[in-house]
Amino acid sequence: MNLIKINIPEADVSITERKQVIKGDEPIITPINGFIDFHLFPRDKGGIFMFYNINDELLFVGKARKIRQRIKKHFEDNVSPIKNHRDEVYRIDACIVEDPTGKRNLRNIYH
């Protein structure tokens, strides 16, 4: 059996589950499945995102034109492919692409 070797690129943004430690007048951030750092993902940029479990095993790979919206939607949507595994997601990595509509750019990240 021949397997395809995929080199996973270095993440531009990476967040992990964590609890907020409130400092001073900092507003309270409502966690989504234990994540409070969604603001680190660009609002209007696209790219590829990867969900990992606590053992650093890759659970899911997706692409999006607006990466922050798409990642959050996976935790809110009833039709998401990860809906039965949301509690397993511990880390989210994203590779940002300036022009997400350029399929070649997204494909070249992995080749």
Image (cartoon, helix red, strand yellow):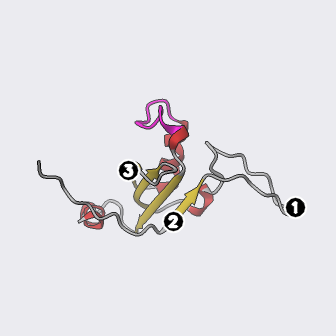
Foreground residue among 85 and 80: 85
Q: Is residue 42 visible?
A: no
Question: Counting other residues with Cα less than 10 Å from the Cα at mark 2, is it few (<14), some (14-19), or many (20 or more)?
Answer: some
Q: Are marks 2 and 3 in contact (CB under 8 Å)?
A: no
Q: Which residue is mark 1?
A: 25
51 to 94, vertically: above or below: above
Query: Residue 77 placed where, x, y %?
Result: 50, 34
Identify which residue is drawn at 46% across, 51% down. Answer: 52
Residue 72 located left or right of residue 109: right
Query: Seen in the image, is 83 located left or right of residue 8?
Result: right
Quadrant of the rendering where the C terminus is positioned: bottom left
Q: Which residue is mark 3?
A: 62
Nearest the camera: 65 or 8?
8
The magenta stretch is 77-86
Q: Which mark is residue 13?
A: 2
Spatial separation of the CA atoms under disc 2 and disc 1: 26 Å
Q: CA distance from mark 1 to mark 3?
A: 36 Å
Magenta stretch: includes residue 81: yes
User: What amino acid is found at the position of numbered circle 1 in the picture?
Assistant: Asp
